[in-house]
Image (cartoon, rainbow, N blue to C red):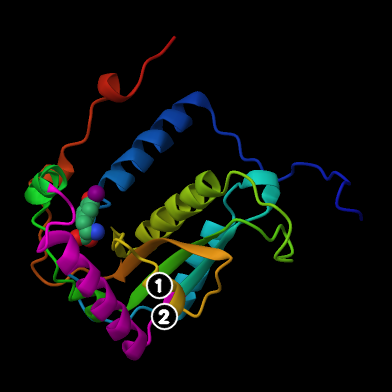
């Protein structure tokens, strides 16, 4: 077998129209139960769940199938502590020294976020997502990767869906700037931190901002021609 050989598509599953409507509506209901939470329990989550979710993320389509991503899954208390310290330092500049600017801070008001990020230490898993501008399929460090941002965005979406479907709550966290993640996670300068995902069980009595539950209608987000 050579890389340019072709093989039959033998795992596509077809459903009849009624079943498709049913499945799409069930999936919609399932995804509508995914909420970003900021209050996590410290209950442990088996590593195997995270491994499966990372493989699900890694199954995402990408430019020329170069898979320009790397995931660092962190359960070490020591590393989580370091990440919290760095993130809170950056966030204090963002919120308290108003680096964010008035308009941004106003937009965040309904979420009730601030510079304190205790969940970065409490949640059982943090997953740092990195993007790679170069490397190709074999991570040779040279080959150009294509549509890197799009590819890593899709893989991150797959990851969030996989974590949710496995039964975990998640938060997408983007400390600004997040360059500290490269150092803490021991990644080289060929990789850029893309996002930090927090995963675990919700804390007892966890709440979500009402603001976050207002999703645009089909008419607002789409048009059919
Ligand atoms: N990174 C900050 C600020 C923040 C920014 C956006 I845009 C959000 O949707 C939520 C938070 C923080 O994590 O608090």
> How many other residues sit within 10 Å of disc 2, few (<14), some (14-19) or many (≥20)?
few
Q: Residue at x 57, y 51 (%)?
A: 60
- Could you say which quadrant of the image residue 46 lies in? bottom left
Nearer to the camera, 17 or 220: 220
Q: Which mark is residue 84?
A: none
Q: Which mark is residue 181?
A: 1
Nearer to the camera, 21 or 9: 9
Report if residue 37 is visible in the image: no
Q: Of helix, strand and loop, which one carries label 1?
A: helix
Q: Is residue 42 left or right of residue 164?
A: left
> How many other residues sit within 10 Å of disc 1, few (<14), some (14-19) or many (≥20)?
many
The span picked out in magenta is 73-101
Q: Does 62 appear in magenta? A: no
Q: Position of residue 157 (x, y in %)?
A: 43, 50
Q: Residue at x 44, y 78 (%)?
A: 183
Q: Position of residue 102 (x, y in %)?
A: 10, 46
Q: Residue at x 45, y 54 (%)?
A: 156
- Residue indicated by mark 2: 184
Question: Outermost residue toward the right?
Answer: 1
The answer to whether the beta carbon of the residue marked 2 is less than 8 Å from any atom of ligand 1 is no
Q: Residue at x 27, y 44 (%)?
A: 32
Q: Position of residue 179 (x, y in %)?
A: 40, 68
| Disc 2/disc 1 C-alpha distance (Å) | 5 Å
Q: Is residue 210 above or below residue 117?
A: above
User: Ligand 1 is located in which of the four quadrants?
Assistant: bottom left
Q: Is residue 16 above or below residue 149?
A: above
- Could you say which quadrant of the image residue 85 lies in? bottom left
Question: Outermost residue toward the top?
Answer: 225
């Amino acid at each position: 077998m050579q890389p340019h050989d072709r093989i039959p598509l033998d795992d596509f599953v077809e459903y009849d129209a009624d079943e498709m409507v049913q499945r799409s509506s069930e999936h919609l209901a399932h995804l509508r139960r995914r909420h970003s939470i900021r209050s996590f329990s410290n209950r442990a989550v088996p590593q195997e769940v995270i491994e499966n979710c990372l493989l699900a993320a890694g199954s995402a389509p990408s430019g020329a199938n170069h898979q320009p991503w790397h995931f660092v899954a962190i359960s070490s208390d020591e590393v989580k502590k370091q990440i919290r310290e760095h993130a809170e330092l950056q966030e204090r500049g963002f919120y308290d020294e108003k680096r964010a600017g008035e308009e941004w801070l106003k937009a965040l008001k309904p979420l009730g976020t601030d510079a304190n990020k205790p969940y970065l230490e409490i949640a059982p898993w943090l997953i740092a997502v990195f993007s790679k501008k170069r490397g190709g399929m074999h991570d040779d460090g040279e080959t150009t990767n294509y549509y890197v941002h799009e590819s890593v965005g899709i893989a991150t979406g797959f990851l969030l869906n996989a974590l949710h479907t496995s039964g975990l709550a998640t938060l997408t966290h983007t400390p600004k700037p997040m360059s500290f993640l490269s150092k803490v996670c021991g990644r080289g300068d060929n990789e850029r931190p893309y996002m930090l995902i927090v995963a675990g069980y919700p804390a007892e009595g966890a709440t979500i901002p009402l603001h976050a539950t207002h999703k645009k209608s089909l008419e607002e987000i789409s048009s059919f021609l």
